[in-house]
Image (cartoon, coloured by chain):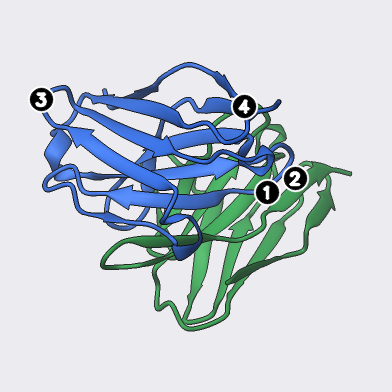
Chain colours: A blue, B green
Amino acid sequence: QVKLVQSGAEVKKPGASVKVSCKASGYAFRNYGIVWVRQAPGQGLEWMGWISTDNGDTNEPQRIRDRLTMTTDRSEGTVYMELRSLRSVDTAIYYCGRWNVRAVDYWGQGTLVTVSS
Amino acid sequence: VMTQSPATLSLSPGERATLSCRASQSTGTNLAWYQQKPGQAPRLLIYAASTRATGIPARFSGSGSGTDFTLTISSLQSDDFAVYYCQQYNTWPPALSFGGGTKVEIK
């Protein structure tokens, strides 16, 4: 069955970087892109970006483009999301999801990233 | 920008729920709906505005196109009380935008 398993919770200081992994299994990895979505405490869902697992192309909102890097390791079936220059407002649960062209049909379990001094 | 209304819907089990989602510009039928319960990841309900995802009960239905969309739950079950999000997307490269959510709570 399709599974997306994310790395564990992180606590970071302001200004630091965090790297979250998302390991996919149960399907042809290169056939589906991966999206990242975050959710601040008590808030709604916010799209962070998309990466092609086939060729590594990415797309992300302008507001976060200079702080976000998404990469893929096709040999491991894993996607990584690195966010730099962390601020307290980046405290959130970060989800990866399989993008099936029309929707996010499978989601990871989420990774809590806490930014605190 | 996606705008959902109402922010909260208070209903009793067995009642019909009607949730709205409005896009600031036409998105065709590039619209999905998700359900999220506390402490869980979102779950896909509807894609392409009106197609139920695998395993989603028939009481969930989606409609609309262009800028106005609706998610209807025909008869609320206890398991349906949750937060619902709409999500619009651009086809290429993929770019997503979520609405602010509608919480369906027990009256």
**Which residue is nearer to you in this view: B2 or A105?**
B2
User: Looking at the rendering, which quadrant does residue B29 occupy?
Assistant: bottom left
Q: CA distance from mark 3 to mark 2?
A: 49 Å
Q: Position of residue A26 (x, y in %)?
A: 21, 24
Q: Please give the residue where the numbered disc 2 appears in the rendered image.
A: B14
Q: Secondary structure at mark 4?
A: loop
| Chain under callout 1 | B
Q: Position of residue B71 (x, y in %)?
A: 59, 61
Q: Is residue A42 left or right of residue A56?
A: right
Q: Please give the residue where the numbered disc 3 appears in the rendered image.
A: A75
Mark linked to residue A13: 4
| Chain under callout 2 | B
Image height of B24 relative to B90, above or below: below
Q: Position of residue B49 (x, y in %)?
A: 44, 65
| N-term-proximal mark, 2 vs 1 | 2
Q: Amino acid at mark 1?
A: Ser
Q: CA distance from mark 2 to mark 1?
A: 4 Å
For the residues bearing labels 1 and 3, Cβ distance under 8 angstroms: no
Q: Position of residue A106 (x, y in %)?
A: 37, 36
Q: Amino acid at mark 2?
A: Gly
Q: What residue is shown at x 83% (from left), y 45% (from top)? A: B12
Say if labels 3 and 4 share a chain. yes
| N-term-proximal mark, 3 vs 4 | 4
Q: Please give the residue where the numbered disc 1 appears in the rendered image.
A: B75
Q: Amino acid at mark 3?
A: Ser
Q: Is residue B98 left or right of residue B32?
A: right
